Image (cartoon, helix red, strand yellow):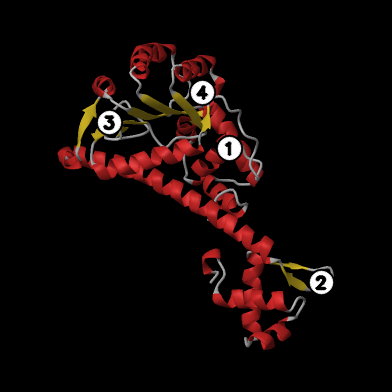
Amino acid sequence: MLDTLGLDATSEQVYRGMLVMPGAGVAVLAEYLGLTEAEVRRGLDALSELALVSPGLDGRTRAVSPEIGLEMLMSRQQAELAARQKRLEESRVAAAQLMAEYADQRSVSGNLGGEQLVGLEEIRHRLTRLTREVREEVMAFSPDGAQTEENMAAARPLDRELLGRGVRMRTVYLDSVRNSAPSTAYAQWLTDLGGQVRTVAALPTRLIIVDRATAVIPVNSEDSAARAVVLTGQGMLTALCALFEHVWAGARPLGVAAPGRDEHGLTGQESATVRLLAEGRTDDAIAKRLGVSQRTARRIATALMERLGARSRFEAGVLAVRAGWLPQ
C-alpha cells in the first residue's frame, strides 16, 4: 500500500510490526511477522534510509510515528513530483525548439503549423505584427535580465496601446532585473497601466504567446536573435501555455520582497544554479539563464561547489542530490 512512498512490501511489514511491538529485536520481529531474520534486517536498512526508524535512548531501534514519518515521505514525494513536472515542461520547450530546427533543415515548417523567422529584423517585424493584432492576452518570458533604455523606449508605445485596449499582459522577468533601477521602473510603469509583472530566478527560454493561439520561440535559446519559429499547432500551444502558467504560479509579483533562504539555506538564484550545474552548464550559460554577468555566475557556482565540497560540476550534481538540494 505504501510502495509509492518508497516502502516495499517487506519494509512496510517490518514497519508495521515495529509499531505494534516497540523495541522488539530482529529475532522477535522475524518470528512475529513470519519472516527470516535476513528479511527483517533488509527491511530495517530500507526503513533507516527513509528515516522511518531511529535509535532509542536504550540503544534499540524504534519506529518513528506515522504522523511524522509518513508525512515527511509524502512531502518528499510532492517535492519530487513538482520537480519532475518542471523538468517535463522545460522538456516541452526543448522539444519545440528541436522541431523548429528539424523543420528548418527539412523545409517542412508548414507541417508544424508554423513558419521560420531568420534574423533579428524579421523576428521583430513579425512580433510587432502579432502584438498589434492581439485581441485578449499576451504572455511572455523575458530572460534578458536588465533591459536597455533603447529597448524599453521602443516598447512603451505598443505596450501603452495594448493595455489601453484592455489586452491582458503578463510578463515574467528574471529576478536580476530587480537590481536594475531602469528595468524596475519600466516594470512598475507596466504594472501601473494594468500589466502584470513577476520574476523568477531562471527562465527556460524566451517565449511570447498571443491569444493562446500563436507562439514565437527561438530555435536556439542561446542565440534568440538568430532564428525563431512561429507555432500555431494546438498541441504545442497547449503545452507552452501550461509551461507559462506553471512558471507564472511560482513567480513573485514585482512588489513582493524576495523570500528568505529555503530549508537548505539556498536563495532562488543559488537553487537555480545548482540545477544548472547538475546539467553541466558552463558559466556563460548559467549567466544567461540567470540574467547576470559571467563573473557573478562564476562566483555563485564556485561558492556552491565549495559548500558541497565538489571538485567538478558532475560531482556537484551528485553531492547536491545527496544533500537533498536536488531530487534523485
Asked if labels 2 and 4 touch by Cβ distance under 8 angstroms, the answer is no
Residue neighbourhood size for the residue with mark 3, other residues' Cα within 10 Å, grouped as few (<14), some (14–19), many (≥20): many
Please state the horizontal and vertical placement of residue 70, each as a whole percent of the image.
63, 63
What distance separates the C-alpha of mark 4 from that of mark 2?
54 Å
Q: Earlier in the sequence, mark 2 or mark 1?
A: 2
Give, as a three-letter code, the residue at label 3: Ala
Q: Is residue 227 above or below residue 49?
A: above
Q: Quadrant of residue 165?
A: top left
Give, as a three-letter code, the residue at label 1: Glu
| Disc 1 secondary structure class | helix
Give, as a three-letter code, the residue at label 4: Val
Q: Which residue is mark 3?
A: 228
Q: Which residue is mark 1?
A: 270
* Residue 231 can be seen in this image: yes
Residue neighbourhood size for the residue with mark 1, other residues' Cα within 10 Å, grouped as few (<14), some (14–19), many (≥20): some
Q: Earlier in the sequence, mark 3 or mark 4?
A: 4
Residue in the picture at 42% in, 39% down: 245
Give, as a three-letter code, the residue at label 2: Gly
Please state the horizontal and vertical placement of residue 77, each as a whole percent of the image.
54, 57
